[in-house]
Amino acid sequence: MRDPLPDYTPSGSLHGCRALVLGGLAQDGSGSAVAAALAKEGAAVALADNTGLPGRAAGARPVPRRRLADDPVVLAAGLVSALGSWSLPIHCDPASESDGRAAVAYTALEFGPLDLLVVHAAAGAARGAQRSGGLGAAVASTAPAPRPLRGPPELGSALRAVRAARPFLSEGAAAVVLGERSAPGAGRPRENAALRSLAGSLRERGVRLNCLVPRPADTDAAVAAAVADLAADDGRTGEVVGVAQVPHPR
């Protein structure tokens, strides 16, 4: 895969961090650009999305690198490795809460506790059936029953993924929900209410949660840089922001 960010100048702000990008890799999403930015900033990156592997059992699973060389998840993982960072490709239905939970657990087993979780909200817009089996079922059985999270369906699904990942997040970790591209201010009041509710509970562990909502005109490179900068910002939490609102120190 060609580097989607050839002009990106890293600052090393995420050196030594362990990250998971959930969704946004299939169907021409911005996940590959986000993964490249995180790798260039020094993070180890796991990548989870639907690989389309034929005959796969239900549930999230790491993907053998020798298979599906043209698959977007495997290609993105290869890009991260080529940029000098550790990578982990995971087959995962991002619309499935149990799959997302299992992807987080596999990442934690491989890398250790997560310092950064990036969830593409659009990946959860389709209401996939709940998957079970394997590690996902084991993790799901230990998780408390979640309270409903109100807000747009795609955002609610992404926030549930963040909440399910809470046991695997390190103290002081960051979570970034990458919203669907929309006009400035679209749906902000509802998004803020749902986001702040979860951000308040995560703040007790020092975990920051923010939502980035790109405009249609924002490039994948700009979105990726904003995600990296938002992840490295150690003060902001519980906010819904646009790409232009994220300071770029480089």
Image (spheres, grey):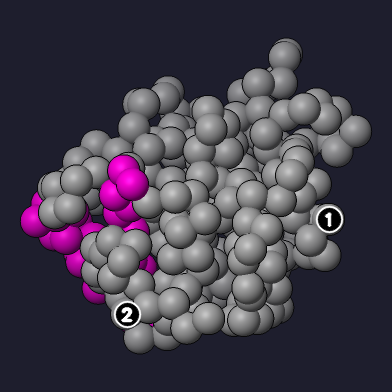
In the picture as drawn, the residue positioned furthest to the front comes out as: 7
* Residue found at the very far right of the displayed protein: 66
Residue position for label 1: 82
Q: Is residue 143 left or right of residue 133?
A: left
- Taking the magenta stretch, the answer to whether it contains residue 210 is yes
Task: Pick the residue in front: 53 or 60.
Answer: 53
Asked if residue 51 can be seen in this view, the reply is yes
- Circle nearer the N terminus (1, 2): 1
Give the residue at x 62% y 81%: 11
Highlighted range, magenta: 188-217
Which label sits in the foreground, 1 or 2?
A: 1
Where residue 151 sits: x, y (%)?
17, 46
Q: Do the residues labelled 1 and 2 touch (CB within 8 Å)?
A: no
The numbered dot on residue 236 is: 2
Q: Position of residue 56 (x, y in %)?
A: 71, 20
Q: What element carries label 1?
A: helix
